[in-house]
Image (spheres, rainbow, N blue to C red):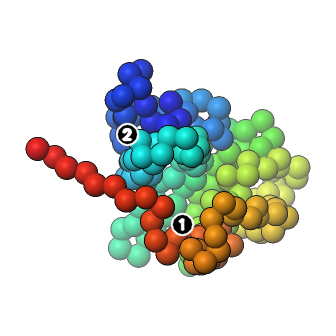
Amino acid sequence: NSKMQSSDSSVYAIGDVATFPVKLFGEMRRLEHVDSARKSARHAVSSIMDPVKTGEFDYLPFFYSRVFAFSWQFYGDPTGEVVHFGDYEDGKSFGAYWVKKGHLVGSFLEGGTKEEYEIISKATKLKPAVTIDLEELEKEGLKFAETVVSQQIVPEVKDTPSSEMVKQSSSVVMMKKPLYVWHAATG
């Protein structure tokens, strides 16, 4: 379930072997990547330590790779019509959007900056309607994601005193001290 519990609520399943609900797509998924494994483990620990305050696992599927000078990131779901943008020949970044039923469901970017990767991540998470034709989407490229993100209002973080937080960017808040302390042991 969204708290990473198996059919036996005292047993938690995480990582590559676990199937869990992906809220954005309204279906169960099994994602085989280190990011999913790490975040599902973190969520399971939170569910165990404070089940009342722990919300649903709201994960945006994310895959990445880096080999020598090449690096790419993918967010979302690679289904629907694919629209390529950018030009690798020019030495600039290039990418693709996946559009399904008139909504952005996936984004890929090769050679982007940290800020550009953050923008396509946010845009994909919003699953916006694509109201322009696909040829225009191809021409807009990253500007489409930038426009989508710039039109959104970022909700305020509540229930935590601001003295306990360090704001790093509009979407990242780091806690000065942990909300809870936990220990794991094997034997």
* Front residue of this view, candidates 136 and 28: 28
Q: Which mark is residue 185?
A: none
| Mark 2 crowdedness (10 Å alpha carbons): few <14, some 14-19, many ≥20 | many
The residue lying toward the viewer, choosing from 149 and 133, is 149
Rendered view: 158 above or below 34: below
Report the residue at 42% width, 51% height from top: 42
Q: Is residue 80 left or right of residue 155?
A: left
- Seen from the viewer's position, the closer of residues 16 and 103 is 16
Q: Which secondary structure, mark 1?
A: strand
Label annotation for residue 110: 1
Q: Which residue is mark 2?
A: 14
State the image coordinates of residue 77 (x, y, percent, origin top left). Answer: 59, 43
Along the horizontal axis of the image, is 162 left or right of 136?
A: left
- Quarter of the picture holding the C terminus: top left
Instruction: Name the quadrant containing residue 118.
Output: bottom right
Q: Position of residue 150 (x, y in %)?
A: 81, 68
Apparent side of residue 24 relative to residue 73 in the rendered image (left or right): right
Above/below status of 93 relative to 103: below
